[in-house]
Amino acid sequence: MTTKTNKITNLMKKEYSCVKNALDFSNPVKNKVKISKSKIFGMSVIRIVILYGLSFMIVYPLLQQISVALRQTSEINDPSVIWLPKKFSLDNIRLSIAALDYWVALRNTFVLSTLSTVSQLISCSLAGYAFARLKSKYTNILFIFVILTIVVPSSTLTLPQFIYFQKIGLLGKAYSIVLMSLFGQGIKSGIFIYIFRQFFKGIPIELDEAAQVDGAGPFQIFLRIMLPSARGAIVTVGLFAYVWQWNDGYFSSLFLRDTTKVLTTAMYSIQHGVHGHLQSLGLWELIGGDVTKNPLFLSTILNTAAILIMTPLLIMYFFVQKLFVEGVERTGIVG
């Protein structure tokens, strides 16, 4: 019994020494460092898993669209073709360019998005500055209406706008959307006014007071002090306004009608012109007339058209991504 007791005692001592070596109770600082390193390692693993998951969700559909766009139409229903086509073809891209009237629609979309973005920057920055600095007893009430334009769905406000532009003869013209942006009623203008207001509120009031002592008025303060300091907010609002106008289909189809073709409205009507473009491009005999009745064929053309619409924005983002990230950090936009 004594021998067995000694063996058990020795085993317990060895286990205790192992635990003591792993976690030194006599050195709490070292224990805290080990725990901190373990937490950092765990958070790194979680962060990597989340980033890889999000990348998969974003990149996977894009790669699938590219794969579909580069395959021959005869391979649409081929179950053996998953990623790489058996034979690469640009017929889907050629057909999508013709069906979209791509170059004309691209030019119109670029001009409209640029004018709308500049108008949004002018109106929203002025409104944000007024709400941040020019205080009166009606300021908070007016700002509540601005917040309501964010909360209330935009579709509920389009009927009076539609009737108004119809009466003044601007319905069907690009000026209608530009005027809405210039007067603070563009796409997501309420959010942009809120961003500028919060940014201008963060600028010290002492700068305004010093400029007033030197004889500057509110408009001079806005131009010479506020705007140069609001580079981050301008870049952020400008990029958001440009992208949202570029991808807008609701307001464009409602106010522009068929008179001014942009990429989104052209995409809506793409299926109606496929037959004619198949003949004009000499693809009818190659593909066959029955393929136009195949829903997968129309889906392929729409996917290819979506890639053509996204490509200019992706190219633009590569050049301005640094400014965009800096602008988001300075304005405090999250989510």
Image: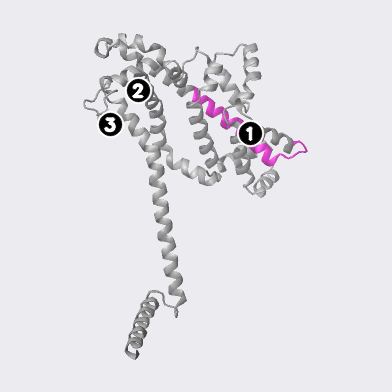
- Disc marking residue 151: 1
Question: On the rendered structure, is 17 left or right of 329?
Answer: left
Question: On the rendered structure, is 252 left or right of 70?
Answer: right
The quadrant of the picture occupied by the N terminus is bottom left
Spatial CA span between label 2 and label 3: 14 Å
Q: Residues within 10 Å of mark 1 (few under 14, many from 20)?
A: few
Q: From the viewer's side, name the closer residue of 303 and 218.
A: 303
**Residue beneath disc 2:** 300
Q: Secondary structure at mark 2?
A: helix
> Mark 2 is on which residue type?
Thr
119 up-or-down from 197: above or below: above
Q: From the viewer's side, name the closer residue of 168 and 41.
A: 41
Magenta stretch? 112-138
Q: Where is residue 100, by image quadrant? A: top left
- Horizontal and vertical percent for residue 38? 41, 64
The residue depicted at 43 percent of the width and 69 percent of the height is 33
**Residue beneath disc 3:** 82
